[in-house]
Image (spheres, rainbow, N blue to C red):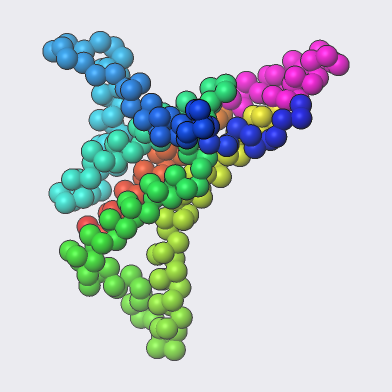
Amino acid sequence: MNENLFASFIAPTILGLPAAVLIILFPPLLIPTSKYLINNRLITTQQWLIKLTSKQMMTMHNTKGRTWSLMLVSLIIFIATTNLLGLLPHSFTPTTQLSMNLAMAIPLWAGAVIMGLRSKIKNALAHFLPQGTPTPLIPMLVIIETISLLIQPMALAVRLTANITAGHLLMHLIGSATLAMSTINLPSTLIIFTILILLTILEIAVALIQAYVFTLLVSLYLHDNT
């Protein structure tokens, strides 16, 4: 009961060496592949989900934007599997680290913005100054739009970090309460344990939704710049 509440968010080490890289590389190993002409039910379901997700994200893009489809699908699979693996006991969730989420958000955002500046520079610069803006407000609006553009990758990373971290903390607190109440009051323990099961189901949904939201926002940034 004296365990540090944030101990589960500390990056693990093996023999003094950081194990975060191995943990990040582990989720892709769980995605099965088939060498046969006829796939089994698991791979068929997996391919159907991938096609459904990519179709939903890519319908609004033009031909140039659809070249990012493989990377966006890989991104949503990686974040979803990482979030789900973090719900296992005694595991580590890399997406609770703001540094890692920034490392994913900043290059993707920068790539989309640079692509927009290269292919549609007039439209990209037009976002900084809406049409019909009064002359006295032009400097202020340019500053506000510039700040809103630069804060986009930070918002992506913080949203994912906050949602995953909050869920893990809540599960840790309720789990500790369940363990403490088990020797005091059995009916209360059953009620708290039921709440813990419902929260776990909710966290599974949050893990998948946050992966989808992160990838969808990157897709929207790409759509605005292609």
Q: Is any part of residue 70 visible from this angle?
A: yes
The foreground one among 164 and 90 is 90
Q: Residue at x 29, y 41 (%)?
A: 72
Q: Quadrant of residue 54?
A: top left
State which quarter of the image contains the N terminus.
top right
| Position of 122 relative to 2 (above/below) | below
Q: Residue at x 57, y 23 (%)?
A: 90
Can residue 193 be found in the magenta stretch? yes
Q: Is any part of residue 220 visible from this angle?
A: no
- Where is residue 218? Give x, y as percent: 35, 49
Q: Is residue 204 left or right of residue 213?
A: right
The foreground one among 207 and 110 is 110
Q: Is residue 56 left or right of residue 101?
A: left
Q: Which residues are magenta?
A: 175-200
Q: Residue furthest right?
A: 184
| Position of 121 relative to 112 (above/below) | below
- Where is residue 182? Give x, y as percent: 79, 15
Magenta stretch secondary structure, dominant: helix
Q: Residue at x 51, y 43 (%)?
A: 97
Q: Quadrant of residue 52?
A: top left
Q: Is residue 203 left or right of residue 78?
A: right
- Where is residue 74? Give x, y as percent: 30, 35
State which quarter of the image contains the C terminus.
bottom left
| Position of 39 relative to 12 (above/below) | above
The foreground one among 164 and 59 is 164
Q: Residue at x 16, y 51 (%)?
A: 64
| Position of 205 relative to 184 (above/below) | below
Q: Quadrant of residue 225?
A: bottom left
Can residue 172 be found in the magenta stretch? no
- Where is residue 138? Give x, y as percent: 40, 83
